[in-house]
Image (cartoon, rainbow, N blue to C red):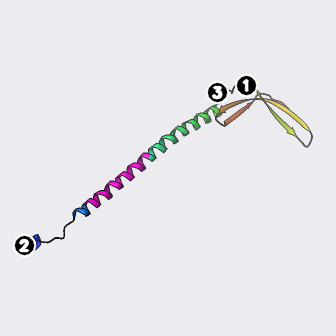
Amino acid sequence: MKKKLKNARGETLVELMASILIGTLSTALLLGGVMAASSIDRDVKALDEAYYTALSAAEGRTAPLPGGPFQLKIENKGSGTARNFPIHLYGGSGMYSYDLKAAGP
C-alpha cells in the first residue's frame, strides 16, 4: 500500500491545462459554427420568402404591373408577317407571367 501512495504517475498540471485549453477551443469552434449556420439560415429564410412572394404574384395574377397593357410582337420572318398582341404582365422581382387580352387569328 505504501508503494502505491508514492507512485508519481498522476497527471501533471501542464497536461491538465492542455486538456482544458483543447476543450475550450473545441467549444469555441463549435459555437462559432452554430452562429454562422444560424445567420445563413436567417438569410436563406428571407430570400425564400421573397421568392415565394414573387412566385405567388406571378402565378396568382392578382394585380398587373403598372404601365400596361404591354405589346407583344410576334414575327414570322419566313412570310414577313408580324402581329402585336396586348398583354398584361404580373409578378415582379424577375419572375413574370402574362395574360393575353386579345383573341382571334
Kindly identify the amino acid type of the residue bearing the numbered disc 1: Gly
Which quadrant holds residue 104?
Answer: top right
Q: Nearer the viewer, residue 12 or 29?
A: 12
Percent x, y of residue 72:
79, 33
Of residues 89 and 20, which is closer to you in this image? Answer: 20
- Say which of marks 3 and 2 sits in front: 2
Residue 20 seen by the camera: yes
Of callouts 2 and 1, the N-terminal one: 2
* Residue numbers of the magenta segment: 17-35
The image position of residue 60, as x and y in percent, is 63, 31
Mark 1 neighbour density, 10 Å: few (under 14) some (14–19) many (20 or more) = few
Quarter-of-image position of residue 7: bottom left
Instruction: Please name the residue that numbered disc 3 is placed on.
Output: 62
- Helix, strand or loop: magenta stretch: helix
Kindly identify which residue carries mark 2: 2
Q: Residues within 10 Å of mark 2 (few under 14, many from 20)?
A: few
Q: CA distance from mark 1 to mark 3?
A: 15 Å
Q: Which mark is residue 67?
A: 1
Query: Which residue does the image show at 66% across and 37% down from the upper left?
Result: 94
Q: Is residue 1 visible?
A: no
In this rendered view, identify the residue nearer to me: 29 or 78. 29
Give the structural element (helix, strand or loop) at label 1. Answer: loop
Question: Residue 34 magenta-drawn?
Answer: yes
The nearer-to-camera label among 2 and 1 is 2
Which quadrant would residue 55 be assigned to in this image?
A: top right
Is label 2 in a helix, a strand or a loop? Answer: helix
Q: Amino acid at mark 3?
A: Thr
Left or right placement of residue 35 versus residue 77 in this view: left
Q: Amino acid at mark 2?
A: Lys
Q: CA distance from mark 3 to mark 2?
A: 90 Å
